[in-house]
Amino acid sequence: MKRRLDSEQDSNKRIRLQDTPGRSRAVRVTPPPPAPQKSMPKADPQRPRINKLTPARPFPTVPVSVSATGPPSAHKEGKNLICITRKTPLATYLRRCKNVIINDGYKTLHLSAMGAAIPHLLQLAVALPPILPFGADEIHSTVTTGTMEVQDEVLPDDEDEDITYRTRGKSTLLVVIKVGDGEFEGNISGPAKRPGVGPRPKQNPNPNPKPPARAPAASRVVVAEPDQDEMEL
């Protein structure tokens, strides 16, 4: 088989194939289109610098009825209000929620998440009911979605200019898990007490106390003043 190129300048090249000396077949070969070139995005030198501020918590860190300066062991209220973040693993939240329901007596959990932590909360809401010692018909969940406004700092390139703020929306998710009627069955009065540790017994005062011994009086030292005549000499 012989191949013969008719023209090199023609964009549509023809290749003539000769099977036999007296017979030939022409085939049109179209070159593939050029691949599109991807343009790299150019960096915008005028793009402002953004500092994302920490959004407000949906629940207070310490309940209003509890002293904020007291030890953490005395905080019994507000244990069922939990904010979910991506920094804490799922197993830690499962163990914490189980202890709040079984040991502390709470029958209602309020779990809140924001932004990228919402998938983490959904996994927790699905994995928590099977590990609780209650029937599936006794556990009820309520899911509420919303949007919260958060603020960001816009840092100027010139240090002499003032910092401006911008507001944007962020998705929120609230899951309320209720066991039975949801009534609290624990005790929140007073600080937590360790077992076997009670108040110290009061000691009876001594009916005949002895008077404290007096210290001996210090000897007085008198220094005689010199005469006037001796001072003049």
Image: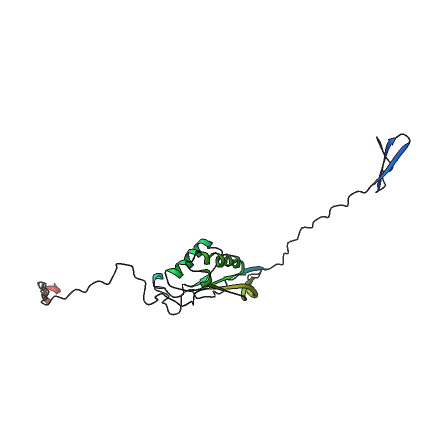
- Return the x and y of residue 49 as percentages of the image width and height: 57, 59
Colour pattern of the rendering: rainbow
Which residue is nearer to you in this view: 219 or 172?
172
- The front one of 41 and 225 is 41
Q: Position of residue 54 (x, y in %)?
A: 50, 62
Say whether residue 223 is visible.
no
Quadrant of the rendered image containing residue 183: bottom left
Total labels drawn:
0
In the image as oriented, which residue stretches furthest toward the right?
22
In front of the other: 36 or 101: 101
Q: Which quarter of the figure has residue 225?
A: bottom left
**In which quadrant will I find the C terminus?**
bottom left
Considering the image in quadrants, where does the N terminus appear?
top right
Q: Tell me where residue 212 appears, x and y as whole percent.
A: 10, 65
Q: Identify which residue is drawn at 45% across, 53% down.
A: 91
**Horizontal side, residue 24 vs residue 143: left or right:** right
Please state which of residues 225 and 108 is positioned toward the viewer in this rendering.
108
Q: Residue furthest bottom?
A: 65
In percent of the image, x 52 and y 63: which residue is there?
173
- Position in image of residue 76 (x %, y %): 36, 64
Residue 61, picture quadrant = bottom left
Does 23 sit above or below residue 109? above
**Residue 233 position (above or below residue 2):** below
Judge left or right: residue 217 versus residue 105: left
Q: Is residue 24 visible?
A: yes
Does 29 sit left or right of 65 as displayed?
right
